[in-house]
Image: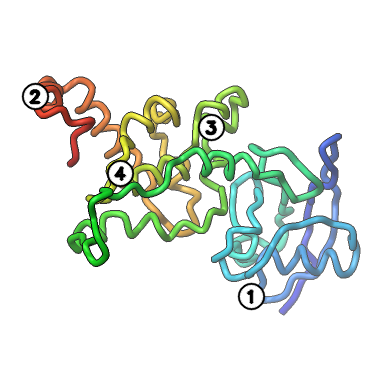
Amino acid sequence: MSYKGNFKVWRGDADGGDLEDYVVEVNEGEVILDIIHRLQATQAPDLAVRWNCKAGKCGSCSAEINGMPRLMCMTRMSVFSESETITVTPLRTFPVIRDLVTDVSFNYEKAREIPSFAPPKNLGLGEYRMKQQDVERSQEFRKCIECFLCQNTCHVIRDHEENKENFAGPRYLMRIAELEMHPLDEADRERAAQEEHGLGYCNITKCCTEVCPEHIKITDNALIPMKERVVDRKYDPVVWLGNKLFRRSGSRH
């Protein structure tokens, strides 16, 4: 079963652009990326779009569909009515290169700012051991496919360009939380999260969690717990005294 679907697709580059109207054949079981590929093949061969696996695992085909950040390969046409006009636009938070392709290098710059895993220097081969519950705490965060939908929808950087310099965004604050939860990591993650990566900018609206295609509970399981530990470290008098007495750089929970 097929029908003619109405679409508005953003066309343009860094100098500007606009939505263009298209009528494209839609077949049963298809996703938005199928439509974009058919549009390229039949009407707009110069349409720029980024994609790779078409299986929801590479994160390449991120876009905004009817204003909602989504993966085009995981958004089924069946969720829309046949009479509905579907709008496909590039991620709004990042600079447009051309059409649906944006420059997401901001995210890689933030990734480079986070120090890697820092185990104790005196550990030898075979001594990198951790309990199963510690493995499970951070395992969820490793499902991230770096589609950057959470970064795109976070209003701290989406609506405030000036914040990008000082705010890593939910994806990389989650990375810091993952490292901070590792029992063998000795870097001062809590201080860095607050003072260098802008944890305090996050006001836990959970918009990042809502758009995550891997259903990672970014806010509840990474950002809020880390915020609580930062507050404990800075304001809890018992923790503060313990840090002073034992000369610890930060409490581990």
- Asked if the residue under mark 2 is in contact with the one under mark 1, i.e. CB atoms within 8 Å, the reply is no
Assess disc 3: are there few (<14), some (14-19) or many (≥20) residues with their C-alpha within 10 Å of its C-alpha: some
Q: Earlier in the sequence, mark 4 or mark 1?
A: 1
Say above or below: 119 vs 127: above
- Asked if the residue under mark 3 is in contact with the one under mark 1, i.e. CB atoms within 8 Å, the reply is no
On residue 29, the disc is 1
The secondary element bearing badge 2 is classed as helix
The secondary element bearing badge 4 is classed as helix
List x then y, in percent, for residue 57: 54, 66
| Residue drawn 25% across the image and 32% down it | 228
Quarter-of-image position of residue 22: bottom right
Amino acid residing under circle 4: Glu
| Residue drawn 63% across the image and 54% down it | 62
Say above or below: 105 vs 127: above
Q: Earlier in the sequence, mark 4 or mark 3?
A: 3
List x then y, in percent, for residue 31: 65, 67
The secondary element bearing badge 1 is classed as loop
Amino acid residing under circle 3: His
Q: Nearer the viewer, mark 4 or mark 1?
A: 4
Residue 182 horizontal side relative to residue 143, left or right: left
Quarter-of-image position of residue 165: top right
Q: Earlier in the sequence, mark 3 or mark 2?
A: 3
For the C terminus, give its image quadrant.
top left
On residue 180, the disc is 4
List x then y, in percent, for residue 71: 60, 58
Q: Earlier in the sequence, mark 1 or mark 3?
A: 1
The residue beneath circle 2 is 245
